[in-house]
Image (tube, rainbow, N blue to C red):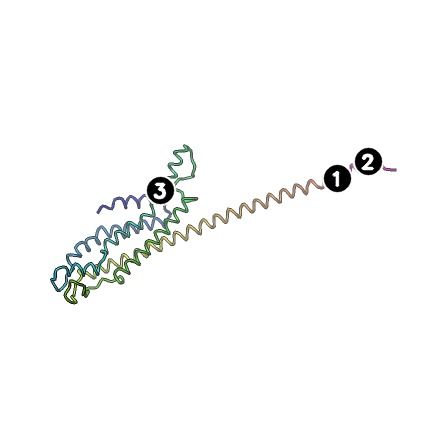
Amino acid sequence: MSWGFLRDLLSGVNKYSIGIGRIWVAVVFIFRLLVYIVAAENIWKYEHDEFECNIKQPGCENVCFDHFFPVSHISLWALQLIMVSTPSLLVVFHVAYREKREKHHNQKLYKSPGEIDGGLLCTYLISLILKMGLEIVFLVLFYKLYNGFKVPRLVKCDIRPCPNTVDCFISKPTEKMIFLYFLVATSCLCIVLNLSELSYLIFKYSIKCYLKRYIKKCQGSESDCHKSGIIGHNRPAAAGRFHNSLASSPSIQ
């Protein structure tokens, strides 16, 4: 399987991410994608052929394997990698839309098309929420499909066409369990990184909006005080002119 498109996607997202987002990209690329390609894919490559039962009843091994492994660990891991990386396309598409809009109007509409603000900030936050949600969904899916995060050495199967309860043996259970724990650990780390980035961005732009409102309020108060000062300064002058006009008018006999 070629993973070039996923590599290009992650490198493209890296340009528009903040510090925590770049750490997430590094974790996905090094500790998940490379581990999958270099090691994990080979461990599960012949899992069906190496699954053995102590009976040679035709169809028994196939039925038992399908029962205990409805979806291969490695296939589900590959699907997870693709799905959790896909929301990042939202950010890439939004930046491309900004760049196209600037070319269409032939003028500078944004400080930088890749700067996280305004609508791009909302898109970025949505992508983070989707990535966290997908990570959690796949962790729950792993747990439900395989009754936990363990790979047993021996499973007992009594599904037809097996004539009775047979013992079936899983190949490399310890090695598979180590990689399964590694998968769970990296997924949890990615969730923590996404949550940290989401909290940081919300906090940062909440403070930014608060400061903007505070500055506008202060400027409005200073403007009102300035106007009040001008009015107060003009009132004594007007009173003085009125008093002088009374003094200069002829007395009424």
Give the foreground label among 3 and 2: 3
Q: Which residue is drawn at the image coordinates 42% and 33% (left, top)?
A: 107
What residue is pinned by disc 1?
Answer: 240
Residue furthest toward the top? 106
The span from disc 2 to disc 1 (Cα, nearest Å) is 14 Å
Q: Quadrant of residue 110?
A: top left
Residue 16: where, in percent of width, then height? 36, 44
Q: Which residue is drawn at the image coordinates 72% and 39% (left, top)?
A: 238
Q: Which element is circle 1 on?
A: helix
What residue is pinned by disc 3?
Answer: 93
Tell me the quadrant of the picture where the C terminus can be found. top right
Which stretch did the figure color magenta? 238-253
Q: Amino acid at mark 2?
A: Ser
Q: Which element is circle 2 on?
A: loop
Mark 2 and mark 1 lie on one chain; the one further toward the N terminus is 1
Mark 3 and mark 2 lie on one chain; the one further toward the N terminus is 3
What residue is pinned by disc 2?
Answer: 249
Residue furthest toward the left? 56
Mark 3 and mark 1 lie on one chain; the one further toward the N terminus is 3
Q: Is residue 74 left or right of residue 222?
A: left
Q: As rendered, which of 166 and 52 lies closer to the eye?
A: 166
Q: Which element is circle 3 on?
A: helix
